[in-house]
Amino acid sequence: MANKNEMIIKFKRNGIDFCLKGSGDATIDWGNGESETVTLSSDKSCSNDKKYDNVAERTVVISGDNITLLRCISLKSEDDFITSIDVSRNASLTELNCEYCNLETLDVSKNTALTTLLLESNQLTTLDVSKNTTLQVLNCNNNFNLASLELSKNTVLSSLSCSYTILTTLDLSKNTALKTLICYSGKDFSKLTSLDLTKNTALEELNCMGNHITTLNLNSTALKKLECSLNDLTTLDVSKNTALEELNCVKNQITSLDISKNTALKKLYCGQNQLTTLDVSKNTVIVKLDCGSNQLTTLDVSNNVALIEFHCSQNQISSLELSKNVVVFSVSVSYNDLSSDALNNLFKSLPLGILDSMDRKPKISIYGNPGDLECNVKIAQKKKWKVEK
């Protein structure tokens, strides 16, 4: 008769490696007539591994009254694959990690105590987590044929990663505790066209790059990191995201960007859009600014005294002044409309260069400007700057 708390791993490989956590003892039947008993800890997982003489189909059975964690470890070899994992008899399980195991199916409907479920890089086509109402962390990245994900019952979910699937919709309206959402896509994958996060007011990190999202609704005042590059956005409203520290909206079709409310912003990447103006006067703690490949004609960075990296290449800027940016180290103004006089004035405004920890000089790139051949680069060089032209 099967032990009510046993877990069964079936595999075809010449070895098996997994970790357990919990309390009391666990018995491991290695499927070759050998077995052993291990004492579990609730604080530290124990690693268990077995090597066999050859590659063959085998079954390992793990039994214990209070096993709370199972982590299967892939050997990442040609002959390494797990055919199935059955955890349906272990109601004590709170964390299951079977990433890179090539699983096609997984039943977690009986594991109602699960708080963490990590399934990255398997071959799942469906995933039912409707019974896992205590689930807090779910990672199902790189399940290339996963077409749908129903999460309405997972109301305490705080972290979701579902990138590189074939999801075209994602309803997170019931997941009001969500803090981290990673749902980026790439070439040859289906893509989200919209993402409504108006109910997710606790959201702190969002990465939805590489989709076809045309609208993005964000209400979280806790949001610190937003990565929405490579989408189809024409507008982006971040006025409510007052804690925002990093924003990457590169390669969209955004025509205006108001970041006046984002006074905590440290990194801004907004290149390859259709911006004609950019006001960064309120962003006084920003250290990295990349606004290249837009349609800017002017840019005032005098209030950005913490700026270290500044790239505004491929715009239409005709004058630029950096005298207030005393710690700036990397500057790119290539392919703008800077005359030789404008470049000379820019050189004069540069702070005295200081070598970094690797003894590198600060550098300024001026390629493709009308005055790049006639300007006096010695002005910058005397200030210990390297000029790339």
Image (cartoon, rainbow, N blue to C red):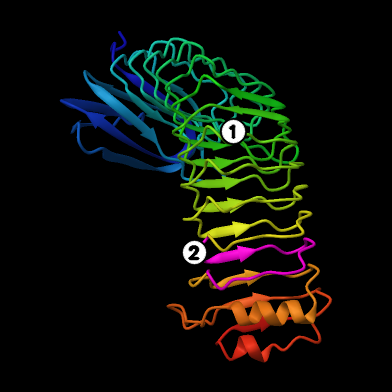
* Residue 139 versus residue 111 in the image, above or below: below
Q: For residue 305, which numbered disc appears in the image? A: 2
Label 1 amino acid? Cys
- Element type where label 1 sits in the image: loop
Place of residue 189 in the rendered image (x, y in percent of width and height, measured from the top left): 72, 34
Q: Position of residue 383 (x, y in %)?
A: 56, 87
Q: Name the image quarter holding the N terminus.
A: top left
Amino acid at the residue labelled 2:
Val
Separation (CA) of disc 2 from disc 1: 34 Å
Q: Name the one closer to the observer, 7 or 358.
A: 358
Report which quarter residue 45 is drawn in. top left
Q: Residue at x 42, y 78 (%)?
A: 357
For disc 1, the marked residue is 183
Which of discs 2 and 1 lies nearer the camera? The answer is: 2
Q: Nearer the viewer, residue 197 or 236?
A: 236
**Magenta region's main secondary structure?**
loop
**Between 143 and 299, the one nearer to me in the picture:** 299
The magenta region covers 304-324
Residue 316: in magenta span: yes
Disc 1 crowd, CA 10 A, few/some/many (<14, 14-19, 20+): many
Q: Position of residue 156 (x, y in %)?
A: 40, 19
Circle 2 SS class: loop
